[in-house]
Structure formats: C-alpha cells, structure tokens
C-alpha cells in the first residue's frame, strides 16, 4: 500500500508596537542565529539546518498557562493536537502522529527528552515547569533517532541552572480546582541544580440542579523534574536528569453518557538519565555518553455495570513498558566539515493484561551524520546514514521471535542567499517497526479471533521538501513544500474464516 502527502505550508511572524508577536501557524520559523541541537544531535546554527524548525524558548514557556507539553504545543499551534478524555494527548505533524497507548517505537512522531526517547507518545504526561526549551523538527528524523520519526521529532530539553533562583506559585478556582508549583535553580562552583514539583487537581462538576458529572480531564496531576550536574572542568560535565509524572483521571473514553464515576484510569511515567558530556579546549572533539532507564504505565478500571453494553464484565486492564537504553557519540571538526558518529541501544519490555502478555524489543543501531560548509558561497551540505537492527520476541505466550534490519539515508542542502534569506532542500527516509501483537497476537476480541502476521514489513516513508526562511529584525517568515511517499502501511486484514490479522 502506498500513500502520498503533498502539502504547502507558510509561516509568518511579525512585530507589533516594538515587541515580537508570533502569528503561530502549523510551521513557524526561528531566528537565523539561534543554536539548536535536535536536527544533528549536536549544537549547530539555524543557518546550517536544511529542515523546518520551531523553537519554543524558556520565556514563552514561563508566560504560558499550560501545565503539560500537550497543552503548550496546542497553545503554540504546533501540529495537530488531539486531546482525548482522561489525560491523553497526542500530537500530529505532517499527517502522522504519536502513539499514545503503546511504546514509542510504534508512533509516527517521536517525542524526545534531552535527546533520547521519552518512552511515551502521550504528551499530557510531560510537564512544563522545568523545561528550558522545546525544539520541533518537521520531517523524517529516523536517521538521527530510529523508528517512529516519520512526521517529525519533538525534543523537550530540561533546564540547566545558570544562576541561583527560586519560585513558588499557587492558585485555586471553581469545582475544587487548585494548583501548586515550587522549584528553582542553584549554581555554586562546579555544581548546578534545577528542579521543580508540580501538582494540580480538580473535582467533578455540579450542574445548577445539583447533578454531579465526572471531570473527564483529570482529577489530579503531579510531576517532579530534576537536572543536576558537576562540571569537573570547564568543558566536561557529569549529569543526572530525573523526571516523574502521574495522572489520575475519571472515565475511559467511551460511554460518558452513563456518567459512571467508578470508571477510572491512572497513567504514570518516570525516567532516569545518567550522562557525561565533554570536549577538548578548542572544541575540535566533542563527545557524549549516556545511559537511561524508565517506565511508562497505564491502567483502566471499568467496574461491572459501568458499560451499558455489558461487554466489559468488570475489566481491569493495564500495560507497562520498561525502557532502558544507551547512547554514545563522538563529533570531530575538520576544517569546514563536522562529523558525528555513534551507537544507540534500546531495550523495551512490555507487559499487558491482554495477549501477548509479555514482549521484548531490542534495537541496536549505528549512525554517521556529516555536515560541510562552504562559507564563501553560504552553502551547507548535510548527509546522514543509519543502520538499525531489531529483534521482537513474544515471551508470554512463549515460542515466537523475529529479527530484521533497516538502512536509513538523509541528504540536505541549505543556502544563505543573504544574511536574512535562506533556501533549503532535503530528502529523508523514515520507518516504523511492526508491534509484537501485529506480528504474533492470538486472542479473541468482540467475538472474533485476532492473529498476528509474522511476515509484516516495517512501514516506510520518503520525504522530499523545499523551503525558505526569512528573518529581519523582528520580522520572520517561512515557506515549505513537502511531498511524502508512505509505503507498507500496516492495516487490519479480514480473513476468509472470519478472523482478523494485519497486512502491509
């Protein structure tokens, strides 16, 4: 199966009364001199980037009333934000979107936390209070980060302390609404610390005649974010990043007409990131090593009688994904050429209350990203190559596994025609591996048998794009045309015996 997307997008930013006011649209430019890290996994100027990029900086985040990343992206009109009941928000970019229920290998837009996988596609679980900036790179990001980055990559960068400060916020409102935020930064000698704690809650609603209706957003949301480090030299830092969030909500997304307050759903996510970044005194060589682990959990309780159709019979269901991984990369600068090479390793263990009950995903990869500038012509050429190997194993019920590999290229060119005007073109591929249930499921659902298809291929995409960015004083504008060929999409297939499976 092949599907094509051809889209023209325009972005425009203007100033009013001497202050910059952003007319946010689907694709929105950033200052030409701004430094970003997501597009090449290392710091580079916006002038050198051949992709379309949006940056939400710390001041914008501070002024926003949004409490989580999903609401913030909606406020800034970044992509298509789909907000479901019960604390579930997905983001869509260029016709693709995150997977909000399963592990993030099965999404089509990739969410990163400080340059590594956040372990979830539900951006309602990621809070804003200790965030330095958010970088959104549109288009295929698989050459940098692997499976799932078809429509784009959203990188949430945790704040690192540059000075000592503190904040305390509190508020309340109707229906028992209240919020509390505390946190701050500490910079002392070689030690830096940045952290925050956030909690918000709201009761159910009452109508004028006294009827009570469940709050289908969330009853309570809390989160902790900490980034601490020790810079034992000016160019070398050991760091630890910890994040945790919890959402307690009423209701499963169906049957709200029943207004049954016994339906509940709980969602949790935590991660720990241990990292070391360093460089030589001249920045000729730069390096980064990290190891991270975490867990993403979702649970739903539908007591008997909550569902008027009666099919659930009091189901309590859940899934949990244990994630761990490692990254190591080395960047060398040789005249006007910069090369970044490294390895990624991911290991996921997924447990469900449905079949298959336990699966594992193992994904090692190697990559090479190169960038050459031609200063006299204002040109920058960037290339990327990545090789992923992955193994999917069904542990319970036991007895099934498969392995495969995927090669991903990228080629881009940017041209600074003047100091204010940049033209850019890019070609990039992306892929998404099949899930374990798509490969090996065997269970009954709504009276039909569901079986996996072990012959499924990864979904793939190829994106061609061209555009321009213009920036002068407080005026910024951007224009992008892209065309995506989407092949081997995995869809439901109905077999002759009445059972269901999946096919490309």
Image (spheres, rainbow, N blue to C red):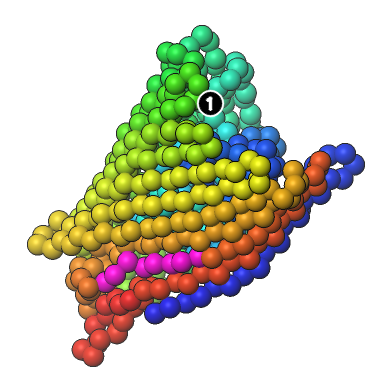
Across the whole image, how many numbered discs are drawn on residues?
1
**Residue 403 lies in what quarter of the image?**
bottom left
Disc 1 target residue: 160
The residue shown at (43%, 51%) is 384
SS of the residue under disc 1 = loop
Position in image of residue 15 (x %, y %): 84, 45
x 41%, y 57%: residue: 409
Q: Nearer the viewer, residue 357 or 461?
A: 461
122 relative to 102 in the view: left or right: right
Task: Tell me the quarter of the picture where residue 301 sits.
Answer: bottom left
Which residue is at a point 22% across and 64% down the rendered structure image? 355
**Residue found farthest to the top:** 189
Q: Nearer the viewer, residue 65 or 214?
A: 65
Q: Residue furthest left?
A: 399
Above or below: residue 56 compared with residue 403 = above
Work out which quarter of the rendered image holds the C terminus and state it.
bottom left
- At 42% from the left and 13% from the top, the residue drawn is 232
How packed is label 1: few (under 14 Cα within 10 Å), some, or many (20 or more)? Answer: many
The reply, left or right, for residue 288 in relation to residue 157 is left
Magenta stretch encompasses residue 16: no
Q: Which residues lie in the magenta part?
A: 456-463
Residue 70 place in picture, x, y as percent: 56, 50
246, above or below 335, in the image: below
Q: Main secondary structure of the magenta part?
A: strand
User: Residue 345: horizontal and vertical position, in percent?
Assistant: 29, 44
Decide which of 322, 142 is in the foreground and name it: 142
| Residue 248 appears in the figure | no
Q: Quadrant of the N terminus?
A: bottom left
Q: Residue 500: x and y, percent?
A: 27, 80
Q: Is residue 423 visible?
A: yes
Which quarter of the figure has residue 186? top right
């Amino acid at each position: 199966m092949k599907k094509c997307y051809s889209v023209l997008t325009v972005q425009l930013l203007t100033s009013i009364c001497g202050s910059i006011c952003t007319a946010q649209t689907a694709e929105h430019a950033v200052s030409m001199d701004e430094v970003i890290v997501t597009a090449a996994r290392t710091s580079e100027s916006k002038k050198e980037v051949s992709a379309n990029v949006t940056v939400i900086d710390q001041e914008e985040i501070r002024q926003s009333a949004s409490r989580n990343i999903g609401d913030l992206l909606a406020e800034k009109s970044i992509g298509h934000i789909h907000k479901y009941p019960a604390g579930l928000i997905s983001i869509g970019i260029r016709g693709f979107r995150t997977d909000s229920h399963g592990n993030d290998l099965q999404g089509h837009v990739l969410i990163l936390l400080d340059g590594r996988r956040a372990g979830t596609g539900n951006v309602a679980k990621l809070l804003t209070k200790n965030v330095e900036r958010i970088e959104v790179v549109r288009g295929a990001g698989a050459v940098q980060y692997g499976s799932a980055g078809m429509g784009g990559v959203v990188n949430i960068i945790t704040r690192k302390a540059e000075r000592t400060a503190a904040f305390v916020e509190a508020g309340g409102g109707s229906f028992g609404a209240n919020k509390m935020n505390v946190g701050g930064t500490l910079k002392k000698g070689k030690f830096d610390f940045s952290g925050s704690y956030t909690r918000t809650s709201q009761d159910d609603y009452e109508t004028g005649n006294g009827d009570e209706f469940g709050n289908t957003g969330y009853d309570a949301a809390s989160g902790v974010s900490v980034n601490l480090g020790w810079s034992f030299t000016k160019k070398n830092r050991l760091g630890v990043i910890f994040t945790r969030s919890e959402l307690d909500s009423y209701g499963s997304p169906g049957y709200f007409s029943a207004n049954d307050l016994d339906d509940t759903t709980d969602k949790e996510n935590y991660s720990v990131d241990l990292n070391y970044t360093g460089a030589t005194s001249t920045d000729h060589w730069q390096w980064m090593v990290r190891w991270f682990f975490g867990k993403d959990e979702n649970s739903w309780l539908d007591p008997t009688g909550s569902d008027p159709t009666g099919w659930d019979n009091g189901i309590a269901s859940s899934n949990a994904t244990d994630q761990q991984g490692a990254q190591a990369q080395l960047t060398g600068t040789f005249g006007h050429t910069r090369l970044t090479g490294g390895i990624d390793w991911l290991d996921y263990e997924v447990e469900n209350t449905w079949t298959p009950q336990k699966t594992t995903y193992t994904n090692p990869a190697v990559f090479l990203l190169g960038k050459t500038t031609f200063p006299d012509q204002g040109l920058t050429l960037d290339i990327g190559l990545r090789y992923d190997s992955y193994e999917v194993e069904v542990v319970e019920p036991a007895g099934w596994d498969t392995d495969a590999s995927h090669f991903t290229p990228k080629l881009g060119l940017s041209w600074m025609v003047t100091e204010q005007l940049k033209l850019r073109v890019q070609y990039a591929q992306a892929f998404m591996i099949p899930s374990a249930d798509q490969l090996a499921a065997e269970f009954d659902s709504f009276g039909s048998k569901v079986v996996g298809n072990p012959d499924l291929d990864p979904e793939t995409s190829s994106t061609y794009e061209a555009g321009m960015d213009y920036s002068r004083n407080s005026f910024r504008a951007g224009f992008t045309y892209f065309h995506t060929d989407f092949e081997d999409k995995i869809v439901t297939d109905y077999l002759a015996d009445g059972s269901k499976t999946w096919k490309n």
